Amino acid sequence: MRADRLLSLLLLLQNRGRMTAPELAAELEVSVRTVYRDIEALGASGVPVLADRGPAGGYRLMDGYRTRLTGLTDAEAGSLFLAGAPGPARDLGLGAVLTTAQLKLQAALPAELAERARRVQDRFHLDAPAWFRDADPVPHLAAVARAVWEQRVIRAHYRRWRGEVHRELRPLGIVLKGGIWYLVALVDEAVRTYRIARFLAVDTTGETFERPTGFDLAACWEESSRRLESALQQGTAHLRLSPRAQRLLPMQFGAVGARALENAGPPDHEGWVRVEMPVEAQAVAVGDLLRLGAEAEVLGPPELRQAVAETVATLAHRYAAGEAEAVHGQ
């Protein structure tokens, strides 16, 4: 590990020029004291590291010095597929490996290509988690990722909404969707999907397995997503939307809301339009549609309209009662 860190330190100085000890410590995710020791070790091994004093000081390599130790290891080459997602790479336990791989690539590139790569990195950033929601805690993600990579069977203690279960899984791949990590695995010859945050314990059995011939993780996930969406969408809501609700619909319901608006009827004299939109089970649909507040009216089906009306009446009664209690309390 220290040899990898020393190489990363050397490549940082080569690629970026003068850097302070705190800057190097932040990049390498170590203490400043460790950076001082590593700088001494590089100097002792013959690398000409110069220390500039003063407010604009820092460490740099002697002018003209360049290392050619830029060959990628297998792990570093594999980590490059996560080059646009440093956060997920870190979650998978590949953060340091990815950083070293990127530094090696930068060191090996001609100057004009290295500068172009730096410009791209400065101008584009991928932030995978969704807005206004903390990422799932995934303490077992690294263990699951190792099992996927090494094709090892795992025993998992898993929490479902109906209770906890124990499963023996043959992990095929990991998917990051909207900031949530999922495991795609074989269970009794069937491919299933598990939310990794719900693993309570993960143990390897020591047994390895062969991946199914021709298995395509991306295609499997796409098909699984289509099945899930089809299963969730259990009906169609007929809605009347104000101009404001028309702006909110794509934000609240994503592509489903956007498609509904594309097929909306003509606006009335107040600018309201009528749309049809797929919805989940009635209990879920009521909560979802109430997020639009008074900017939307549910026209049908009758049972959905009735359910929304009953929920609104209950809320009105509760708030009216609460207001009366507050007044009496004064």
Image (tube, rainbow, N blue to C red):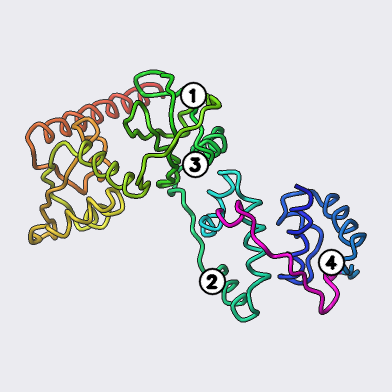
Amino acid type, residue under disc 4 in the picture: Tyr
Residue contact at pointers 2 and 4, CB within 8 angstroms: no
Residue contact at pointers 1 and 3, CB within 8 angstroms: no
218 left or right of 298? right
Question: Which numbered disc flags the more N-terminal residue, 2 or 3?
Answer: 2
Question: Which numbered disc flags the more N-terminal residue, 2 or 4?
Answer: 4
Q: Residue at x 86, y 50 (%)?
A: 33
- Where 18 falls versus 39 (above or below)? below
Q: Nearer the viewer, mark 1 or mark 3?
A: 1
Label at residue 155: 1
Q: Residue at x 32, y 44 (%)?
A: 220
- Rounded to the nearest angstrom, the CA distance separating label 2 from label 4 is 26 Å
User: Which element is circle 1 on?
Assistant: strand
Question: Which numbered disc flags the more N-terminal residue, 3 or 4?
Answer: 4
Residue of label 3: 135
Q: How many marks?
A: 4
The one of 76 and 174 positioned closer to us in this rendering: 76
User: Magenta stretch?
Assistant: 55-78
Residue 198 place in picture, x, y as percent: 45, 29
Asked whether residue 137 is drawn in magenta, I would say no
Question: Which numbered disc flags the more N-terminal residue, 1 or 4?
Answer: 4
Label at residue 120: 2
Q: Residues within 10 Å of mark 2 (few under 14, many from 20)?
A: few
- Rounded to the nearest angstrom, the CA distance separating label 3 from label 4 is 37 Å
Overall secondary structure of the magenta stretch?
loop
Residue contact at pointers 2 and 3, CB within 8 angstroms: no
Residue contact at pointers 3 and 4, CB within 8 angstroms: no
